[in-house]
Image (spheres, coloured by chain):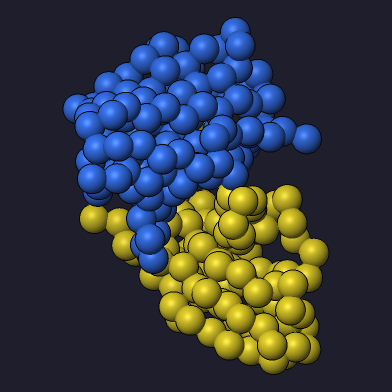
């Protein structure tokens, strides 16, 4: 079935460094790719998303890139800060026709050290 | 501001008990979802509902059922709780449009002993 693979599972960086998380998806009909951030003990919250008609989107220190041909997309965080420490989930829209089903990656635990 | 609430933050139940987890959203969303979150496995869809009394199985429906009698409320039922259902359960809702944000509740940490 459809799946989303996410790497790495853990990522440790120094404050000020950049962090990159990569995801691949299997359903070529997927057209929406959100990224969620889940801080410890809190609910997942959308931080950025991209649709299949664009290749890159930026919002301050975060950016997402999409390569439809290769079926992968990435989250880039620049100038990381300790408050960026969290679990990040990528997702892709599920089976064609689908009621806004999302298929999530397994998550990346990012630790930013001061 | 979208609000999704879940009936309990923490729940401890015994093996074999029938367990009800409730989710309420206040944004008149058509779609509601139940996920299970386990370390290293991400968010796995258990069931979702696209309208009142309408439901579809997700990826891991075994051992679970759902009920949606009113648009704002979506219940997850564990018919006979087992220890392998110990997990974090997250509810989400969204409008009935493909490719749009899902809004999550705070989660229920269920422990089955």
Residue A25: horizontal and vertical position, in percent? 63, 26
Residue B71: x %, y % from top left: 48, 64
In-image side of B76 versus A11 (left or right): right
Q: Residue at x 36, y 37 (%)?
A: A13
Chain A, hue in figure: blue
A111 over B5 or under it: above or below: above
Residue located 36% across and 15% down the image? A56
Q: Is residue B70 above or below residue A34?
A: below
Q: Residue at x 45, y 39 (%)?
A: A11
Image location (x, y in percent) of residue B79: 75, 80
- Locate the N terminus of chain A by quadrant: top right
Chain the render paints yellow: B
Judge from the rendering whether residue A90 lies leftward or rightward of residue A76; answer left or right. Answer: right
Which quadrant would the C terminus of chain A be assigned to in this image? Answer: top left
Viewer-side residue, A109 vs B56: A109
Q: Is residue A71 visible?
A: yes
Q: Nearer the viewer, residue B30 or A71?
A: A71
Q: Residue furthest left?
A: A60
Q: Does B82 sit above or below residue A86?
A: below
Please give the name of the residue rendered at 58% of the width and 78% of the height, measured from the top-left corner. Answer: B110
Corner quadrant of residue B85: bottom right
In the image, taking residue B34 as reference, residue A82 lies left or right, namely left
Q: Is residue B35 visible?
A: no
Please state if B19 lies on the left or on the right of B10 as rendered. Answer: right
Q: Give the image location of residue A44, x and y in percent.
A: 41, 53
């Amino acid at each position: 079935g459809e799946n989303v693979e996410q790497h790495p599972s853990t990522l440790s960086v120094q404050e000020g460094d950049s962090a990159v998380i990569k995801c691949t998806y299997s359903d070529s009909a997927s057209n929406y790719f959100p990224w969620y951030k889940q801080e410890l003990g809190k609910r997942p919250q959308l931080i950025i998303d991209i649709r299949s008609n664009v290749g890159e989107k930026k919002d301050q220190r975060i950016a997402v890139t999409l390569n439809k041909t290769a079926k992968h997309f990435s989250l880039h965080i620049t100038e990381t800060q300790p408050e960026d420490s969290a679990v990040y989930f990528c997702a892709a829209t599920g089976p064609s026709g689908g009621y806004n089903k999302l298929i999530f990656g397994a998550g990346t635990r990012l630790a930013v050290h001061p | 501001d979208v609000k999704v609430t879940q009936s309990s933050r923490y729940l401890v139940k015994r093996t074999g008990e029938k367990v009800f987890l409730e989710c309420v959203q206040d944004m008149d969303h058509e779609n509601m979802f139940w996920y299970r979150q386990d370390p290293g496995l991400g968010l796995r869809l258990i069931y979702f509902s696209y309208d009142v009394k309408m439901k579809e199985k997700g990826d891991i429906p075994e051992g679970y059922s759902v009920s949606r009698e009113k648009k704002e409320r979506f219940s997850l039922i564990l018919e006979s709780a087992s220890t392998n259902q110990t997990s974090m359960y997250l509810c989400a809702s969204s409008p009935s449009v493909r490719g749009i944000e899902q809004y999550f509740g705070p989660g229920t940490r269920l422990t089955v002993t």
